[in-house]
Amino acid sequence: AQKITQTQPGMFVQEKEAVTLDCTYDTSDPSYGLFWYKQPSSGEMIFLIYQGSYDQQNATEGRYSLNFQKARKSANLVISASQLGDSAMYFCAMREWNSNSGYALNFGKGTSLLVTP
Amino acid sequence: ETGVTQTPRHLVMGMTNKKSLKCEQHLGHNAMYWYKQSAKKPLELMFVYSLEERVENNSVPSRFSPECPNSSHLFLHLHTLQPEDSALYLCASSQIQGVDSGANVLTFGAGSRLTVL
């Protein structure tokens, strides 16, 4: 069953505006981690931001912030002051403890973001 | 070299060929991963190696054979592939520490784009 859901296949935002990319997750494990990655057309997955399930405050990294709503099981990514270079695929991922794979990540299907001038 | 390096970046092979994908990490990490990224699916975890031991094999067909000779190198051996195996194959590494540690960030390579004719 899909554990990470990204409902927005594609998003547009104008340069310098803020944009929110949605992510919901499903887990019964009290200990987990949530990640956002960016994948430009070159293919490499670039780590953006991390939120632990026990973290009390929302994570922030520069222009990226994670709107973590634990009760709703959502972990939306907010990009402030969008730049043309932000155009890429964005993936939400979750790490649960698994006795086999340990710390491997499960990914959503991604959201394609296009920043327009 | 730094980070995670994958070679070759592009590979075209026939269904009867045997080829290998190579991944090398220069980060001192103790876990390595193979993911498959197809056009219409989320990233699929294929194999996980932790401390050079395979800890996950996600129902991957036997025509894919991983090898991890040491903590810095990971191979994916390919033989008698099918056209549906055409995809981007991503290698990643991480440093496994605590269960809920932000340090368990996966660092990805740029991927190997495989086309099976």
Image (cartoon, coloured by chain):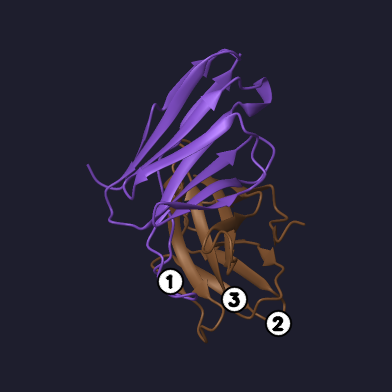
Which chain is disc 3 placed on? A
Residue at the extreme bottom of the image, as rendered: A56
The residue indicated by pointer 2 is A71
Q: Nearer the viewer, residue A15 or B49?
A: B49
The residue indicated by pointer 1 is B102
**Where A66 sits versus A117, above or below?**
below
The crowd level at tag 3 (other Cα within 10 Å; few <14, some 14-19, many 20+) is many
The crowd level at tag 1 (other Cα within 10 Å; few <14, some 14-19, many 20+) is some
Amino acid of disc 3: Phe
**Where A95 sits versus A115, above or below?**
below
Q: Which chain is purple?
A: B
Evaluate whether residue A113 shows in this view.
no
| Same subunit: marks 2 and 1 | no
Q: CA distance from mark 2 to mark 3?
A: 9 Å
Residue at the extreme left of the image, as rendered: B1
Q: Residue at x 50, y 84 (%)?
A: A57
Which chain is disc 2 placed on? A
